[in-house]
């Protein structure tokens, strides 16, 4: 339900530009499925992404794995590139040395016993002819170097290479590429090879260009293998990511459905707390906490419902109780305004009856006000360490006149020594007065009422017993309810308002004590009130009190005894 209940339109804006108050139209309450408009209609690139947590978790897992694989692939390829470059340099150096050694053999053979390089830095013409032959060029370029070859013969003095005037030779690569090799358009560093000639030493410098190598093929093979591994890993990651996301989102979905059930009024909705169904300890703890919360919500709602029903019944009982004396006085008033008002005897009788009803109304109003104050916490106990005997004795003395009118034997038994406990004398006296008043009311003429006070390990015990009509076992659990007077049709039960025992219960609760009652039909009832030495310390209970916590527990035994325990935390 929307806030407010107005369905009327908003008033128009004023001439000064101030907008009128915004109105809220009545409508259904937003459910748990409703999302904000910003989430319902994603804009731009957000439309391309999934809107569920499972989908986003899967995408995030795949993206992280893809990024990791990409970084690994780039790193591996770069490292392999450096490795292949190093291998390529070593291979070209080895080829250059092979070419230089072959050139030295050809030059020494072509020059016979003459020096290959003269003292004026000139290569023997026979060597030049031999090295420029096509057969030698094919051997040098196609077989040994597998690259374009440049050969220079000269001297190397003081770290400076000086080629001969006719010592520069070149041979181009003409053969096709071997299997698995490709041509690299690079030029190697010059490789110099010293030769100790017959008469004059010399150096041979070899430079290779555009060689055939395995580098490109190896890199392509490695990259392809990494790509296949990456695709396989991505496929596995998609399945694993979806499974992991489902493992995480299924518990969340269960909690969402259970929360929705609670929101829709299914207060008994719970989630399973089996660890095998949740997987992780965190989800198990979350399930336990959710069930605990749901239990507390259900308990709170049930308490609210009971309080609502109790309040409804209380209002109905109050209305019924007030209606009876009001109706009686209205009848007396009508009779007095008629001819009965002229009869002095009838007028006196009606006025006396009206006074009785007025007293009943006043007594009822006072008890309702008292009970309302007790329930709302407006009454603060005046706790003082006094002798409980004086409080009980004074309350019994106030009821002595009523007992004599009823022809009852009212006696009180008090211990010889003082019983000092911390209590509110006025309120405890009210408890004793109400219990004694009930005992007098429900005891026939000639019966007896006994009041006894005794010390206990818990504090003190006040027992009020009578030899009256007793209470039916079916009525025992309800005797502390407000306005409950029992169902037995007799004058005693019909004369009260049903508030006395409710007030007794509230006052005893405030003192942290207990009330117990045992009764048998036609044999009498016994009410036992146990009060602690100090209401501020209610952790110590009577030895025979099995109740735990705060509240009211009613138990009916086979002998139709009822125990009502009421405890509060001070």
Image (tube, rainbow, N blue to C red):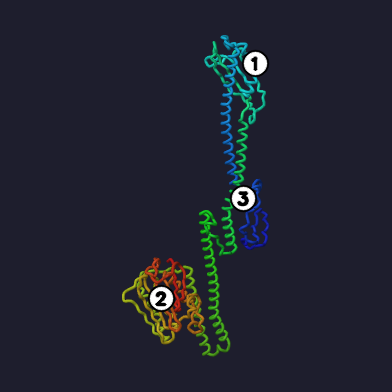
Residue 528, labelled with which disc? 2
Question: Residue 114 is drawn in which quadrant?
Answer: top right
Q: Which residue is mark 1?
A: 132
Q: Nearer the viewer, mark 3 or mark 1?
A: 1
Left or right: residue 392 compared with residue 364: left
Q: Residue at x 43, y 83 (%)?
A: 523
Task: Tell which of 484 and 134 is nearer to you.
Answer: 134
Precedes in sequence: disc 2 or disc 3: 3
* Residue 285 vs residue 171, the one in the foreground: 171
For marks 3 and 1, give the CA distance.
72 Å
Label 1 element class: loop
What residue would you read off at disc 3? 55
- Residue 194, horizontal then vertical, whole percent: 54, 17
The residue carrying pointer 3 sits among few (fewer than 14), some (14 to 19) or many (20 or more) residues within 10 Å by Cα, namely some
Secondary element type, mark 2:
strand
Q: Are marks 2 and 3 in contact (CB under 8 Å)?
A: no
């Amino acid at each position: 339900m929307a806030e407010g209940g107005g369905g009327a339109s908003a008033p128009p804006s004023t001439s000064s530009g101030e907008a009128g108050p915004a109105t809220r139209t009545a409508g259904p309450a937003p459910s748990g499925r409703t999302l904000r408009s910003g989430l319902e209609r994603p804009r731009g690139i957000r439309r391309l992404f999934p809107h569920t947590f499972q989908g986003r978790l899967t995408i995030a897992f795949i993206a992280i794995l893809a990024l990791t694989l990409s970084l690994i692939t780039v790193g591996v390829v770069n490292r392999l590139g450096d490795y292949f470059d190093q291998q390529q340099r070593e291979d070209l150096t080895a080829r250059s040395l092979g070419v230089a050694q072959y050139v030295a053999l050809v030059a020494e053979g072509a020059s016979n016993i003459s020096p290959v390089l003269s003292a004026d830095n000139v290569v023997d013409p026979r060597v030049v002819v031999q090295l420029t032959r096509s057969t030698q060029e094919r051997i040098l370029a196609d077989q040994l170097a597998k690259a374009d070859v440049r050969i220079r013969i000269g001297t190397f003095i003081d770290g400076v290479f000086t080629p001969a005037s006719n010592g520069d030779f070149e041979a181009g690569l003409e053969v096709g590429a071997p299997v698995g090799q490709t041509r690299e358009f690079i030029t190697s560093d010059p490789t110099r090879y010293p030769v100790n000639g017959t008469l004059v030493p010399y150096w041979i410098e070899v430079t290779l260009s555009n060689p055939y190598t395995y580098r490109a093929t190896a890199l392509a093979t490695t990259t392809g293998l990494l790509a296949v591994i990456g695709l396989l890993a991505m496929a596995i990651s998609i399945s694993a990511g979806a499974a992991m996301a489902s493992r995480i989102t299924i518990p969340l979905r269960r909690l969402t459905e259970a929360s929705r059930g609670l929101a829709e009024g299914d207060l008994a909705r719970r989630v399973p707390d089996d660890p095998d169904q949740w997987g992780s300890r965190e989800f198990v703890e979350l399930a336990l906490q959710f069930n605990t919360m749901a239990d507390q919500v259900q308990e709170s709602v049930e308490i609210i419902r009971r309080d609502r029903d109790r309040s409804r019944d209380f209002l109905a009982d109050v209305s019924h109780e007030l209606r009876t004396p009001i109706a009686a006085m209205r009848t007396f008033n009508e009779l007095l305004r008629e001819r009965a008002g002229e009869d002095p005897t009838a007028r006196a009788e009606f006025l006396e009856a009206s006074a009785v009803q007025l007293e009943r109304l006043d007594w009822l109003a006072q008890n309702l006000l008292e009970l309302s104050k007790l329930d709302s916490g407006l009454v603060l106990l005046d706790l003082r360490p006094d002798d409980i005997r004086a409080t009980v004795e004074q309350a019994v003395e106030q009821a002595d006149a009523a007992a004599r009118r009823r022809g009852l034997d009212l006696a009180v038994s008090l211990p010889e020594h003082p019983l000092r406990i911390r209590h509110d004398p006025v309120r405890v006296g009210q408890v004793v007065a109400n219990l004694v008043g009930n005992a007098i009311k429900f005891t026939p003429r000639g019966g007896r009422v006994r009041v006894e006070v005794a010390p206990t390990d818990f504090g003190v015990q006040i027992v009020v017993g009578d030899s009256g009509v007793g209470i039916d076992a079916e009525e025992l659990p309800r005797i502390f309810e407000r306005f409950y007077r029992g169902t037995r049709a007799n004058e005693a039960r019909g004369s009260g308002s049903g508030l006395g025992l409710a007030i007794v219960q509230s006052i005893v609760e405030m003192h942290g004590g207990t009330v117990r009652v045992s009764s048998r039909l036609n044999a009498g009832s016994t009410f036992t009130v146990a009060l602690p030495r100090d209401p501020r310390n209610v952790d110590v209970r009577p030895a025979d009190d099995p109740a735990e916590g705060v509240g009211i527990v009613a138990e009916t035994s086979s002998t139709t005894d009822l125990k009502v325990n009421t405890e509060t935390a001070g």
